[in-house]
Image (spheres, rainbow, N blue to C red):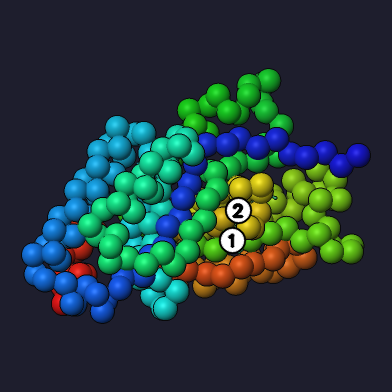
Amino acid sequence: MVEAVETMDGWYSLHDMRTVDWVSWKMASAEEREEAITSFLNLIEKWEAVEEAKNGSHAMYTVVGQKADLLFMFLRPTMEELNELETEFNKSKMAEFLIPAHSYVSIIELAKYRESKDGVDPETLPEIQARLKPILPKWEHICFYPMNRRRIGDENWYTLEKDVRAKLLYEHSKTGRKYAGKVKQFITGSIGIDDWEWGVTLFAHDALEFKKIVYEMRFDEVSSRYGEFGYFFVGNILKKQAVPAFLHV
Ligand code: 76R
């Protein structure tokens, strides 16, 4: 029987995309807009305090293209905390001017394909714990897309033996490592949780690196034979200080 790989699971993740309702935003009074911006900045400060205390992390980007205007990625220790955060956001004055565009729920995941060294469970290692509960980088650009592993005819990831999958992923990781310092990737697992099997979140200083890495990886067997891809979101960082300017009309 084909053996599943054990996963190490970290923080719960919510990708939350929203579109600004510019018409109602422009129609609102200056006081109302001010109130909304203040509510938004207060929320951001709360998220920053959570991150400071290492109880979660967040990323905030403006989306290029018409799929949304804002992309948030939130990480929290539990599903309940993600839900509370989302509900608090929804109740805020700012949310009155934001239309939900998309969301994706998943969990930070690392697979235990490599055998543990000296009988040490990798999950106990501090460097692994840091990757399972990461503070997201505040790099200039983000790219998010969901993906599946194929399950069609001979191209079935789930009928491959574990050592074969491990080898294919090792080859994949060699391509990935060429982008060290240029692209930072977070793989979140969403089997049983959302519509695709994994979410891929990439951060880069130069958005061109997204095209480079994703293109190069298309030739790795694990992607060319077994990868299926969904939609893509791409964006630019939105710093707290830049929020009033972004919303200025
Ligand atoms: O966890 C590790 O870093 C060890 C090696 C590794 C694994 C197991 C690794 C490295 N990845 C792993 C698993 Mn990856 N990754 C993607 C995408 O567009 C595409 O073709 C694929 C989207 C990118 C861009 C990427 C980048 N990886 C996975 C899995 C889970 C598979 C499973 O369990 O079946 C998916 C879905 C996935 C997809 N990967 C790396 C990268 C990069 C940049 C690395 C090197 C990281 C580093 O060493 O710093």
In the picture, which quadrant includes the N terminus? top right
Three-letter code, disc 2: Asp
Count the marks. 2
Percent across and percent down for residue 220 are 70, 63
The answer to which image quadrant residue 240 occupies is bottom left
CB atoms of marks 2 and 1 within 8 Å: yes
In the rendered image, which residue does mark 1 sit on?
A: 146
- The amino acid type, in three-letter code, at marker 1 is Pro
Residue 225 can be seen in this image: yes
| On screen, residue 232 above or below 121 | below
Residue at the image point whose x is 9% and y is 69% from the top:
30
With 43 as the anchor, is 183 left or right in this view?
A: right
Q: Name the residue nearer the viewer: 175 or 184.
A: 184
Please state which of residues 184 and 101 is positioned toward the viewer in this rendering: 101
Q: Residue furthest top?
A: 119
Q: SS at mark 2?
A: loop
Residue carrying label 2: 194
Q: Which residue is at 68% across, 28% downward?
A: 116
Which residue does the image show at 48% across and 28% down from the upper left? 126
Residue at figure coordinates x 24%, y 42% from the top left: 46
